[in-house]
């Protein structure tokens, strides 16, 4: 059986991506911070699909976490075909209201560990005819968002890094896809301390993690370079591109204050 590894797999979009991949016949390796939630996902997947599931408790904030994941996968001697970099988080508030250490943790998870996962798992994916990397960006990657400044910037990085890598690795048999979800019914809002105005705006256009995961996995398996989930998010990305930046940034600031 071909295998897929998914970070941030214990809940939300990551959990639903695991379901989609298991449905497509992949054995899945789950990585997240909460052992109880990972065990629940493992049991749920194995009960529903004829696949094997294993998990590793790991926090990508910690130095050396990616090396431990690589060692875990290598010891299994498996046929790895899919890498899903889903782990990430954001915070709302003015940039200077958070310490450098807090901001550094977000950059570590959203950018640095994603790059390290791509770099260190490439040898396990290349040379097999066809393999995939799925990176999770965000609809916030298409414009600056005051009061979510650093988070949006990390997702700009993920978007552009993934698009460039798609063209570098395609000829090597590794297809890189980046998906940009908008508002999704996950615990992101609680962890990010999203203000009431932003929550109300999100409720009007929110998608379920299952719907996002279906679009993400379908786009990945089709070899797409970029997937924006939902019509509203597609329109938003287009408007952010054509509208004067000062206008879109002023609107965003009002929502996230």
Image: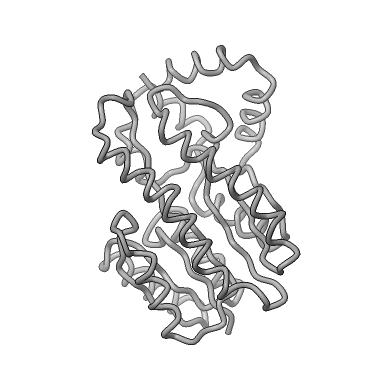
- Report whether 192 appears left or right of 9: left
In the picture, which quadrant includes the C terminus? Answer: top left
Q: How is the image coloured?
A: one colour
Q: Is residue 53 above or below residue 189?
A: below
Q: In the image shown, does 222 or 80 lie closer to the viewer?
A: 80
Expressed as whole percent of the image width and height from the top left, the position of residue 242 reads 69, 21
Q: In the image shown, does 13 or 249 lie closer to the viewer?
A: 249
- Report whether 255 appears left or right of 97: right
Q: In the image shown, does 176 or 197 lie closer to the viewer?
A: 176
- Report whether 102 appears left or right of 162: left
Expressed as whole percent of the image width and height from the top left, the position of residue 150 reads 41, 33
In the picture, which quadrant includes the N terminus? Answer: bottom right
Q: Is residue 228 above or below residue 34?
A: above
Residue at far right of view: 171
Expressed as whole percent of the image width and height from the top left, the position of residue 188 reads 37, 43
Question: For residue 130, which quarter of the picture?
Answer: bottom right
Question: For residue 228, which quarter of the picture?
Answer: top right
Q: Is residue 255 above or below residue 182?
A: above
- Report whether 136 appears left or right of 12: right
Q: Residue at x 26, y 39 (%)?
A: 102
Q: Residue at x 56, y 51 (%)?
A: 211
Q: Residue at x 45, y 81 (%)?
A: 74
Q: Residue at x 52, y 69 (%)?
A: 121
Expressed as whole percent of the image width and height from the top left, the position of residue 42 reads 38, 74
Q: Is residue 37 above or below residue 189?
A: below
């Amino acid at each position: 059986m071909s295998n897929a590894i998914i970070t941030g797999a214990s809940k939300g979009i990551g959990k639903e991506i695991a379901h989609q991949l298991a449905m497509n016949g992949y054995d899945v390796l789950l990585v997240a911070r909460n052992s109880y939630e990972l065990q629940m996902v493992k049991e749920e997947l194995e009960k529903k699909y004829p696949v094997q599931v294993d998990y590793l408790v790991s926090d990508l904030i910690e130095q050396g976490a990616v090396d431990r994941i690589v060692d875990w996968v290598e010891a299994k001697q498996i046929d790895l075909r899919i890498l899903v970099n889903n782990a990430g988080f954001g915070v709302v508030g003015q940039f200077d209201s958070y310490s450098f250490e807090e901001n550094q943790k977000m950059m570590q998870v959203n950018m640095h560990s994603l790059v390290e996962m791509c770099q260190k798992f490439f040898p396990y994916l290349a040379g097999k005819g066809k393999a995939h990397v799925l990176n999770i960006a965000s609809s916030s990657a298409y414009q600056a968002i005051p009061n979510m400044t650093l988070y949006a910037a990390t997702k700009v990085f993920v978007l552009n890094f993934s698009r460039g890598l798609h063209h570098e690795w395609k000829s090597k048999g590794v297809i890189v896809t980046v998906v940009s979800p908008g508002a999704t019914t996950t615990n992101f809002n609680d962890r990010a301390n999203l203000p009431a105005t932003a929550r109300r705006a999100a409720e009007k256009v929110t998608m379920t993690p299952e719907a996002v995961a279906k679009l993400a996995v379908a786009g990945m398996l089709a070899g797409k370079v970029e997937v924006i989930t939902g019509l509203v998010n597609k329109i938003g990305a287009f408007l952010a591109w054509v509208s004067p930046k000062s206008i879109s940034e002023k609107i965003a600031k009002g929502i996230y204050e």
